[in-house]
Image (cartoon, helix red, strand yellow):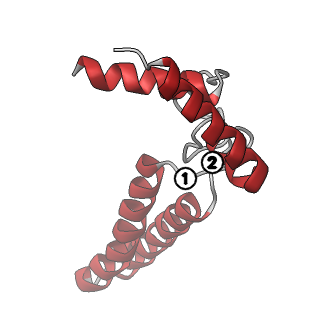
Amino acid sequence: MALSEQERRILEQMERELRREDPDLASTMSAQTQTVQRPGRKGYSPRRVATGIVLAVVGLILPLVGITIGITWLAVLLGAVGFGLMLVGVLMVAIPTVPGQGHAPSKPRDTSSFMERQQRKWDERKRR
């Protein structure tokens, strides 16, 4: 069900008033909804963070296992491997990823006007 002419005029008037009174808010609302990952900005992949945490925990456990075994050379070896795993795990969590490396492609930008997007949302709601 489409909007009537009166509803359309009211919405256009509200949009003009919003742009006049608060241009920052209006530009934010008319811009594409920002996702967690902006183009050109580094972010954190949940899979990478989880892998880093698991590596860090395994790295903490390995030296303890080496100490409990009691064999000196094996304890030193497990301690060094554990330290390496902890370092890699912490770095995986601490350093954000560069966009384009293992990220899913972003959605295409919606360049339609505010009124067109509102009309589309209204139509989708009426179809349900």
**Which callout, 2 or 1, points at the residue further toward the start of the chain?**
1
Per the model, the C-alpha gap separating discs 2 and 1 is: 6 Å
User: Count the marks: how many?
Assistant: 2
Of helix, strand and loop, which one carries label 2?
loop
Residue under numbered circle 1: 44
Q: Is residue 98 left or right of residue 37?
A: right
Would you say residue 49 is visible in this rendering? yes
Q: Is residue 101 above or below residue 26?
A: above
In the image, residue 106 lies at what x, y percent?
Answer: 57, 28
Would you say the residues marked 2 and 1 are in contact, meaning their CB atoms lie under 8 Å apart?
Answer: yes
Query: Which of the pair 15/66 is nearer the observer?
Result: 15
In the image, residue 76 lies at what x, y percent?
Answer: 45, 77
Residue under numbered circle 2: 97
Please give the name of the residue rendered at 50% of the width and 48% of the height, measured from the top-left corner.
Answer: 45
In the image, residue 12 lies at what x, y percent?
Answer: 63, 31
Q: Quadrant of the C terminus?
A: top left
In the image, residue 28 lies at what x, y percent?
Answer: 67, 47
Q: Is residue 42 left or right of residue 71?
A: right
Q: Amino acid at mark 1?
A: Tyr
Report which quarter residue 67 is drawn in: bottom left
Q: Residues within 10 Å of mark 2 (few under 14, many from 20)?
A: some
Please give the name of the residue rendered at 64% of the width and 37% of the height, measured from the top-left corner.
Answer: 13
Q: Amino acid at mark 2?
A: Thr
Please give the name of the residue rendered at 41% of the width and 47% of the height, measured from the top-left corner.
Answer: 47
Q: Residues within 10 Å of mark 1 (few under 14, many from 20)?
A: some
Query: Which of the pair 61/34 is nearer the observer?
Result: 34
Q: Is residue 106 left or right of residue 82?
A: right
Query: Which of the pair 2/87 is nearer the observer?
Result: 2
Report which quarter residue 10 is drawn in: top right
Query: Which of the pair 1/88 is nearer the observer?
Result: 1
